[in-house]
Amino acid sequence: MSLTPPGYQTVQTEDGSVTFFSERFGEACHSPAGAKAETVLHYIEGCKIPEKALEKNVSILEVGFGLGMGMLTTWERTKSLPAAIHFVSVEIDPELVKWFYEEHKNHPALNDPKFSFEILTGDARVTLPAYVKQYHPKWNAIYQDAFSPGRNPVLWTVEWFTLLRESSADDVVLSTYSASSSIRKSLVEAGWKLYPGEKFGQKRSSTRAKLTGMTDPEILLNLERSPIKALTDEPTP
């Protein structure tokens, strides 16, 4: 790995893969239990990418490009499958995007005609609505992998999840490492149906969301009992 981009520290995770610690957000891009293992569990398997790619072309939105692990791992797991993959990611830091292209300029994923990808660089609350307005995507999978709600709440609000819902296909699966009551309430208020996801590292659970079916009864009961409110764009009184 070449020089770490400014504002980051390199962190070795337990599965041998590397992540970055962001000085800006005070948080690592992945779990210390394993950056690649977490990516596979929550996003590739959590969104059922291989199963979808056996049946049809797949449109994926990733919230938080980071080191590019989500994109590269998706390519690895789908390169032998018949589907074409369209992968769109949002990333606020242009230095990370610059680092990625320098680090992986000869990677075969960047030249695979069946795998197209775009990185929307800048504030995702600006870049993604503009992209949606222009291209009218229908996401089959969403990797909700932003920095945590406590560090980056604007990408976990009711309004954000409403934007994602309105630009998704009926079969979409949204997957995230977080299981906090605040983000689950945000998802429910935005019209998503919630299901429990797998535990990983120190986290006892995670969250999967769809547009069909019914929210898991246990999740719904816990949310009804919780005094924590959904995150919104409205200022806290």
Image (cartoon, rainbow, N blue to C red):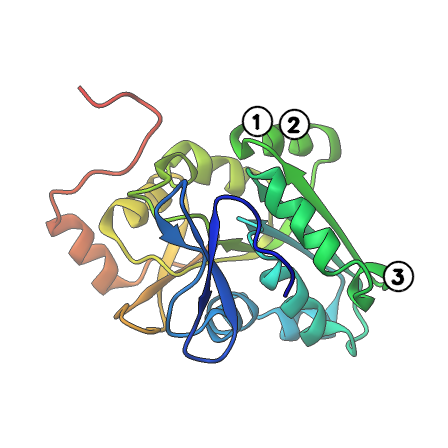
Q: Would you identify the image quadrant in which residue 154 lies?
A: top left
Q: Residue furthest front?
A: 3
Does residue 179 sit above or below 165 in this rendering?
A: below
Given residues 35 and 79, the one toward you in this image is 35
- The x and y percentages for residue 120 are 66, 39
- How many other residues sit within 10 Å of disc 2, few (<14), some (14-19) or many (≥20)? few
Residue type marked 3: Pro
Label 2 residue SS: helix
Say few, some or many: other residues with alpha carbon within 10 Å of mark 3 (under 14 / 14 to 19 / 20 or more): few
Q: Are circles 2 and 1 on residues that touch, CB within 8 Å? A: yes
Q: Is residue 125 visible to the viewer in this orientation of the structure?
A: yes
Q: Could you say which disc has been placed on residue 195 in the image? A: none
Marks 2 and 1: which is nearer the front? 1
Give the residue number, with chain letter if any, for mark 3.
Answer: 113
Marks 2 and 3 in Cβ contact (< 8 Å): no
Give coordinates of residue 153: x percent, y percent.
35, 38
Whether residue 138 appears in this view of the structure is: no
Q: Secondary structure at mark 3?
A: loop
Residue displayed at 52% across by 65% down: 43
Q: Position of residue 48 (x, y in %)?
A: 57, 70
Instruction: State the CA–CA distance, disc 2 to disc 3.
Output: 25 Å
Tell whether 22 sits left or right of 226: right
Q: Which mark is residue 126?
A: 1
Identify the amino acid type marked 2.
Ala
Residue pointed to by mark 2 = 130
For the residues labelled 2 and 1, the Cα–Cα distance comes to 6 Å
